[in-house]
Image (cartoon, helix red, strand yellow):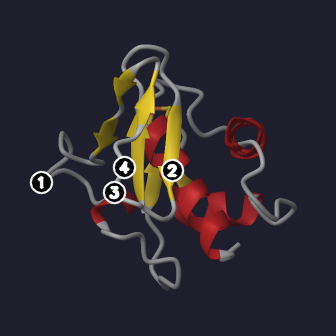
Amino acid sequence: MKVYKCNQCGNLIAMISASGVPVMCCGKPMEEVVPNEEDAGAEKTVCDLQPLDLDAKENYVVCKCNQVSYFDILDSLQKHSSIENLLDVFDDVKNTTHCSTGCGGCYEKVIAVISEALSAGKH
Ligand code: FES
């Protein structure tokens, strides 16, 4: 699964199945979010896995500011069954775990974990 960001409005989308047609928003192609480029060689995070290993036995820190782990996010998704509104699910995960309430640098990582977990039904 790939995540795309609109550099105009900031929309984030998760591509569950690609047809080959470019992803557009605000009249322009969306940019693929490549997680963890700036963190290469730094502390291991969930985005070191490509694709995310949702059956992982090992836990990872997704939000460094608040030490929110990959398993914390999966646990907070228990009451959600689908990605009907990704940003509403993100807000609920944020309120439950306090992830992405510090520097906000984990925002795209948290979105990627939520998207992949809900699309794979692994929560
Ligand atoms: S890393 Fe999550 S808020 Fe800073």
Q: Where 37 falls versus 54 (above or below)?
A: above
Q: Is residue 119 visible to the viewer in this orientation of the structure? A: yes
Amino acid type at mark 2:
Ala
Residues at marks 1 and 3, CA–CA distance in whole angstroms: 32 Å
Badge number at residue 14 = 2
Mark 1 neighbour class, 10 Å CA radius: few under 14, some 14 to 19, many 20 or more: few
Residue underneath mark 1: 41
Real-space Cα distance between discs 3 and 2?
Answer: 14 Å
Most foreground residue, 37 or 69: 37
User: Which mark is in front, 4 or 1?
Assistant: 4
Q: Residues within 10 Å of mark 2 (few under 14, many from 20)?
A: many
In the rendered image, which residue does mark 4 sit on? 21
- Find residue 83 and report its image quarter: bottom right
Of badges 1 and 2, the one in the foreground is 2
The residue drawn where x is 82% and y is 59% is 80
Disc nearest the viewer among 4 and 2:
4
Front position in the image: 83 or 90: 83
Residue under pointer 3: 20
* Viewer-nearest residue: 58 or 55: 55
Of marks 3 and 2, the one in the foreground: 3
